[in-house]
Image (spheres, helix red, strand yellow):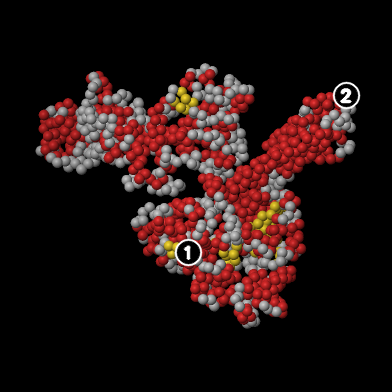
């Protein structure tokens, strides 16, 4: 800025406006200097300005001369731009609480000043033109005038204007698109429901446009509007029910909103409504206020985006305290803001106290301390709550305001003229009617509206004149309601009475305002039969049927359609009167609606496949027109019906149980069937049984059918009258868009993406700013990988010993982004391979991107792909195809995989089977989920077989490139397979846990998949898989197959278990193969491990034939092989045979040492098995007894309870080499020997007495005297 100071001193005595340049600079620097982050950002901005002004000093002499008017004009433009720049700067630092909002405000500031800085740089380029520089040199010597061509200057100026206009328009469009995306994201986060609110705000005045204008002249309102201190900034507008408070509130809101917000500040409002769950408590009020601030203030929008991007909308933003904190921060960041709350008396329970106390005790003091001018207007009744809370605040009482009464008189005259014109009455009668209504109203606009609407809806002059009689003229609001009820109910035909009563009952007890088509649907639907008869639609509109008891509001999205009109009671007093009068039994209405909703949701059309004829007929008839309401609110009506003194009626409990049964995994569950006997717990059951997810899945299927056929269905007016126009609705039941939806499918998909990926990166130039993440953990991983300068990351100190990278490859390997940029800008190629330097030809695919990917440096990868390097490019060498994308997947670098997928490069769909296979083998769920979700058009079912075969080939071909063997875990294979074939899993709800795979022989998908894998290539796929390192696929296939499939043969008679025993992982430490063997045994009960191949070898024989011995596999086979004496290994010399036996014995001893309680499927301990196995000697048994001496007398967990001595004696009888085993057992000390003999005697084996005598004879023959003595003592074998 030194150059500017030198130049402006020339005109200092002429132009006083120079102070407008330096004054803001000084003020901004003083404000920013209190915080390091802000002063750095501000100085960076001034540095950009300084660079754009760097050549001005060169023209110092020329500007002072009299002949350089064009340069003086350029200088004026410079000053204008600098003034605009400072206007933006001061907008940041003059905001209340600017530190909190600095980051968001600075983002908006940068967008505003980009065109200014760009304009300054363009002027710099013009001044730097070689001709102009030469001209300046010449003018420095002599006062040279007017060398530039005027025409050329004009052309240059015009081009500049066009260029600036195009740049500004492009930036504006880009900003608009980005801002709109942020706003939609925040509305989804806040779950804003604008169900009819805008229509209420836009509704016409009750009388003339000037009605209510008196409020702007009221002293209390003017004092409130002009209030600047902490006093007088709260105003309480009150009156009796129906006095017209809401009408006045709407007028005030329109009045305040029509003012220039840059001068008078922002205006936010909320309209409470007692019969709308979305509009009767603090939370929806806070969400709506935030949503309105988002629309009015870009800084607030960016601040809330930054705060909510790492939040889950279903958790943090459901917290009242979180919403209060955010709203308070945003409100008090405004210089001036007006808040209008209408109908606060209609809030539920203690909500008015919560809301008013929060504003008075938290928001207003905070605003005063921060310099925010905040005003609060509260409209409501003096109901004993609000008047007590606001007793100290200024008030406007409508019942004492003469101007308000005059408005009612004007309204009465206007409607009286309309009525008397209809019934041909005289001016005197017109005046009489107007006077009578205005006088009786007692300041209640609602009374005048109801009475006049009632008169206007009458059918004859006689009826009108009869009603005008003094003894019948309603003397108050309730009497006015009574006259309407008499006319539309008691004096009408029975069919009309029934219709009116049903409509009023539904409106009064509904959880939210109903649309007219939803009311029509309830007339047409027979939930018990599962049918819909459109001929039952009411031909008259709701207003004609219910007269002035109801109000009709147009729909936001389809305002011209009668079917979409929103129906509500004219006022909450009308509904209350109908209940008090006994016309409407509220509890019975809730019970009836609960029964209807439960039966409706469990009816046949809901439970059938949408493709069936019955479901199609139901769809065409409009049967699903009540789907939106019933799905969300069925449980509410059951709960309300439960408020009966004796509990919910039996029909309610029965219907609820029917609903539970229809959507239960186990319909015969006794706990469900017993609920009718204990109706009190039925509501709890509806909540805890989690049927909402199952209902939601049916809704999704039904809506999909309706959307696909809407063009044909909409040709029939009955369908449109009940189902309405096409809306693309959100499938999430508790989303505000579940009922309202969107006009286009694309908008809905964007909305659904925000549900699925609610966590957004707050960096606006990052790809995850728009795409988002599924979880907070993934967002944190993204920040760590891509935004390392974030202040919440740990500080690291560089090593003093590190040298600079020698080339771009070394810089990529180290993750030094600055050095990578330097090498690249110096000419280093990003697509070159490192092999050209020193590496072998085999490493020719090693590019800078590959190295950065391999090392996991996501920020370096991002820089390289942004320079145009395709991460999907495949490098070929000797049959091996590899790419940076595959390396990222193999290394489980999920953030880098996500970056590559969203980098904007096209990838061949044919490569995805390999991507998925590599991700599964890498064992990283996040990486796999990225692939499964991209691209959305990928048909996983179509590539299922390719993925399975790629799993096998990737294991065999690329095995040497894996950091470790793939884990023995099939969950990732199931995650992929579930995406391809969701119907093969028991629970089709995405949020469910557990795979619940269903082996359904009747399923065409299941049979086709088995056939593809098992009945091709000589049935070798299963054998090849079990014989490979592809453990995830092996376990998955075992989940898919059954017992008979494991007996299929291939490769000349081998079963799958033989292939596993032959080709099991090299080395003896692979536990995964043992897990697979156990799974085989679980499936077929050990049949496979006891079945020899064509050579007569059992799996354990095959396993023992290979070195090094697979000890974990041998352990399992040893335990579960019935005939361990099948054969001895063949084809090897004696020394190799002895080595194999020694290795096998060491494995057995180690197994016992790890878990001495291990038993096989026959209940035998390792010791018992060893005692009967020929190739295990007595020395090994002795080693096992050293581990656990109780082995010697531990019987089998079997029916005959045989002991180790039984097995040793059997082996001794069959093979003389086994004598030492029996001798060992009979040579133990006396105590142990007694236990052995007692256990032997207790065996239930057939012929055990003879077996005991054989043991006695054996001991005598071998002269084991101590054993014989103990036998004599015990009477053993006598």
Residue drawn where x is 44% and y is 61% of the image = 600
Going by the image, does 773 lie left or right of 472? left
Tag count in the figure? 2
What label does residue 924 carry, if any? Answer: none
Neighbours of disc 2 within 10 Å: few (<14), some (14-19), many (20+): few
Residue 10 lies, in percent from the top left, at 87, 33
Residue drawn where x is 16% and y is 33% of the image = 1210
Residue drawn where x is 34% and y is 56% of the image = 668
**Residue 422 or 638: which is nearer the viewer?**
422
Residue drawn where x is 61% and y is 78% of the image = 460
Name above or below for residue 226 compared with residue 941: below
Q: Which circle's residue, 1 or 2, is located before the other in the chain?
A: 2
Name above or below for residue 530 compared with residue 1247: below
Residue 864 lies, in percent from the top left, at 57, 29
Residue farthest to the top, as pictured: 838
**What residue is shown with label 2?**
141
Neighbours of disc 1 within 10 Å: few (<14), some (14-19), many (20+): many
Residue 1001 lies, in percent from the top left, at 32, 45
**What residue is shown with label 1?**
534
* Residue 451 visible in rendering: no
Closer to the camera: disc 1 or disc 2?
Answer: 1
Residue 288, image quadrant: bottom right
In which quadrant of the rendered image does the N terminus lie? top right
Residue 848 lies, in percent from the top left, at 55, 25
* Residue 608 visible in rendering: yes
Q: What element carries label 2?
A: helix
In which quadrant of the rendered image does the C terminus lie? top left
Q: Is mark 1 on a helix, strand or loop?
A: helix
């Amino acid at each position: 800025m030194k150059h500017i100071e030198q130049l402006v001193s020339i005109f200092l005595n002429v132009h006083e406006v120079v102070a407008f340049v330096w004054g803001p600079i000084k003020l901004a620097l003083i404000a920013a200097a209190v915080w390091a982050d802000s002063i750095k950002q501000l100085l960076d901005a001034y540095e950009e300005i300084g660079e754009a002004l760097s050549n001005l000093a060169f023209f110092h002499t020329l500007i002072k001369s009299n002949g350089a008017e064009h340069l003086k004009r350029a200088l004026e433009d410079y000053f204008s731009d600098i003034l605009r720049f400072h206007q933006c700067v001061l907008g940041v630092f003059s905001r209340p609480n600017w530190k909190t909002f600095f980051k968001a405000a600075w983002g908006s500031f940068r967008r505003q000043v980009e065109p200014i800085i760009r304009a300054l740089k363009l002027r710099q380029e013009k001044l730097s033109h070689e001709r102009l520089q030469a001209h300046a040199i010449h003018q420095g010597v002599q006062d040279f005038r007017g060398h530039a061509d005027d025409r050329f200057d004009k052309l240059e100026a015009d081009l500049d204007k066009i260029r600036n206009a195009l740049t500004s328009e492009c930036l504006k469009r880009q900003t608009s698109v980005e801002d709109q995306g942020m706003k939609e994201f925040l509305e989804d986060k806040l779950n804003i429901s604008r169900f009819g609110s805008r229509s209420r705000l836009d509704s016409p005045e009750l009388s003339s446009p000037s009605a209510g204008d008196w409020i702007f002249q009221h002293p209390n309102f003017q004092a409130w509007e002009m209030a600047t201190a902490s006093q007088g900034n709260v105003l309480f507008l009150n009156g009796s029910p129906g006095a017209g408070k809401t009408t006045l509130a709407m007028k005030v809101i329109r009045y305040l909103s029509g003012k220039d917000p840059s001068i008078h500040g922002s205006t936010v409002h909320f309209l409470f409504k007692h019969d709308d769950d979305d509009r009767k408590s603090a939370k929806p009020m806070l969400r709506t206020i935030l949503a309105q601030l988002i629309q009015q203030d870009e800084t607030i929008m960016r601040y809330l985006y930054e705060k909510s991007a790492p939040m889950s909308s279903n958790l943090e933003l459901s917290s009242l305290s979180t919403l209060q904190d955010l709203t308070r921060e945003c409100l008090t960041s405004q210089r001036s803001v007006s808040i209008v709350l209408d109908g606060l008396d209609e809030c539920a329970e203690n909500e008015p106290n919560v809301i008013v106390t929060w504003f008075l005790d938290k928001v207003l003091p905070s605003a005063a301390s921060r310099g925010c001018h905040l005003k609060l207007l509260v409209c409501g009744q003096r109901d004993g709550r609000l008047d007590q809370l606001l007793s100290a605040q200024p008030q406007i009482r409508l019942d004492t305001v003469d101007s308000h009464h005059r408005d009612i008189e004007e309204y009465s005259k206007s409607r009286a003229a309309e009525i008397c014109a209809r019934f041909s009455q005289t001016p005197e009668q017109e005046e009489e009617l107007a006077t009578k209504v205005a006088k009786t109203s007692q300041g209640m606009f609602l009374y005048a509206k109801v009475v006049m609407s009632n008169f206007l809806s009458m059918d004859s002059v006689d009826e009108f004149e009869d009603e005008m009689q003094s003894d019948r003229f309603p003397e108050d609001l309730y009497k006015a309601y009574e006259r309407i009820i008499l006319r539309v109910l008691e004096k009408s035909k029975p069919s009309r009475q029934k219709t009116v009563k049903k409509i009023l009952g539904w409106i009064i007890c509904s959880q939210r305002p109903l649309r007219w088509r939803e009311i029509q649907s309830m007339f047409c639907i027979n939930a018990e039969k599962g049918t819909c008869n459109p001929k039952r639609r009411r031909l008259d509109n709701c207003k004609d049927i219910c007269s002035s008891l109801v109000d009709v509001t147009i729909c936001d999205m389809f305002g011209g359609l009668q079917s979409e009109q929103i129906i509500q009671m004219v006022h909450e007093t009308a509904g209350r009167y109908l209940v008090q009068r006994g016309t409407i039994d509220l509890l019975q209405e809730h019970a009836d609606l609960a029964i209807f909703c439960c039966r409706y949701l469990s009816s046949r059309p809901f439970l059938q496949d949408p493709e069936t004829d019955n479901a199609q007929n139901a769809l065409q008839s409009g049967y699903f027109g009540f789907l939106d309401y019933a799905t969300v609110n069925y449980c509410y009506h059951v709960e309300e019906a439960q408020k009966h003194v004796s509990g919910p009626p039996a029909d309610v409990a029965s219907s609820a149980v029917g609903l539970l049964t229809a959507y239960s995994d186990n319909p015969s569950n006794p706990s469900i069937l017993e609920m009718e006997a204990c109706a009190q717990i039925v509501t709890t059951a509806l909540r805890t049984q989690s049927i909402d997810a199952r209902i939601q899945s049916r809704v999704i299927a039904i809506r999909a059918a309706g959307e696909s056929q809407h063009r044909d269905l909409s040709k029939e007016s009955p369908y449109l009258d009940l189902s309405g126009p096409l809306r693309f609705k959100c499938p999430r039941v508790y989303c505000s868009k579940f009922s309202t939806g969107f006009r286009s499918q694309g908008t809905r998909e964007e909305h659904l993406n925000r549900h699925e990926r609610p966590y957004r990166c707050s960096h606006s130039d990052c790809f995850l700013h728009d795409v988002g993440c599924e979880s907070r953990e993934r967002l944190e991983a993204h920040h760590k990988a891509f935004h390392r300068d974030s202040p919440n990351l740990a500080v690291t100190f560089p090593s003093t010993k590190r040298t600079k990278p020698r080339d771009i490859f070394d810089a990529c390997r180290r993750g030094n982004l600055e050095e990578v940029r330097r090498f690249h800008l110096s000419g280093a190629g990003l697509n070159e391979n490192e092999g050209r330097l020193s590496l072998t030809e085999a490493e020719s695919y090693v590019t800078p991107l590959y190295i950065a990917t391999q090392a996991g440096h996501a920020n370096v990868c991002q820089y390289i792909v942004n320079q145009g390097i395709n991460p999907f490019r495949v490098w070929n060498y000797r049959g091996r195809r590899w790419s940076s994308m595959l390396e990222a997947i193999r290394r489980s670098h999920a953030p880098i995989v996500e970056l590559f997928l969203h980098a904007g490069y096209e990838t061949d769909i044919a490569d995805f089977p390999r991507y998925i296979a590599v991700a599964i083998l890498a064992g990283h769920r996040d990486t796999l989920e990225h692939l499964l979700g991209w691209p959305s058009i990928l048909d996983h079912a179509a590539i299922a077989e390719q993925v399975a075969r790629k799993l096998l080939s990737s294991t065999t071909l690329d095995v040497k490139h894996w950091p470790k063997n793939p884990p023995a875990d099939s969950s990732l294979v199931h995650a992929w397979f579930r995406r391809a074939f969701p119907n093969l899993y028991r629970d089709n709800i995405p949020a469910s846990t557990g795979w619940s795979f269903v082996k359904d022989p009747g399923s065409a998908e299941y049979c086709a998949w088995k056939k593809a894998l098992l009945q091709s290539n000589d049935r070798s796929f299963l054998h090849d898989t079990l014989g490979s390192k592809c453990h995830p696929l092996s376990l998955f296939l075992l989940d898919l197959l059954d017992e008979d499939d494991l007996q299929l043969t291939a490769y000349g008679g081998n079963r799958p278990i033989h292939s596993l025993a032959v080709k099991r992982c090299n080395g003896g430490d692979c536990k995964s193969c043992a897990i697979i063997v156990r799974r085989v045994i679980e499936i077929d009960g050990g049949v496979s491990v006891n079945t020899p191949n064509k050579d007569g070898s059992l799996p354990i024989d095959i396993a023992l034939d290979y070195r090094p011995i697979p000890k974990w596999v041998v352990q399992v086979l040893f335990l579960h092989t019935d005939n361990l004496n099948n054969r001895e290994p063949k084809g090897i010399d004696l020394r190799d045979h002895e080595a194999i036996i020694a290795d096998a014995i060491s494995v057995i001893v180690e197994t016992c040492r790890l878990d001495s309680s291990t038993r096989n499927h026959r209940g035998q301990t390792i010791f018992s098995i060893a005692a009967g196995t020929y190739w295990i000697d007595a020395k090994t048994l002795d080693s096992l007894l050293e581990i656990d001496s109780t082995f010697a007398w531990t019987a089998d967990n079997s029916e005959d309870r045989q002991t180790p001595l039984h097995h040793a004696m059997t082996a001794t009888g069959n093979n003389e080499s086994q004598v030492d085993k029996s001798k060992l057992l009979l040579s133990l000390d006396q105590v142990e020997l007694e236990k052995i003999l007692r256990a032997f005697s207790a065996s239930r084996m057939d012929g055990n007495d003879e077996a005991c005598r054989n043991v006695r004879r054996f001991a005598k023959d071998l002269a084991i005297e101590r054993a014989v003595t103990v036998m004599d003592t015990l009477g053993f074998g006598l």
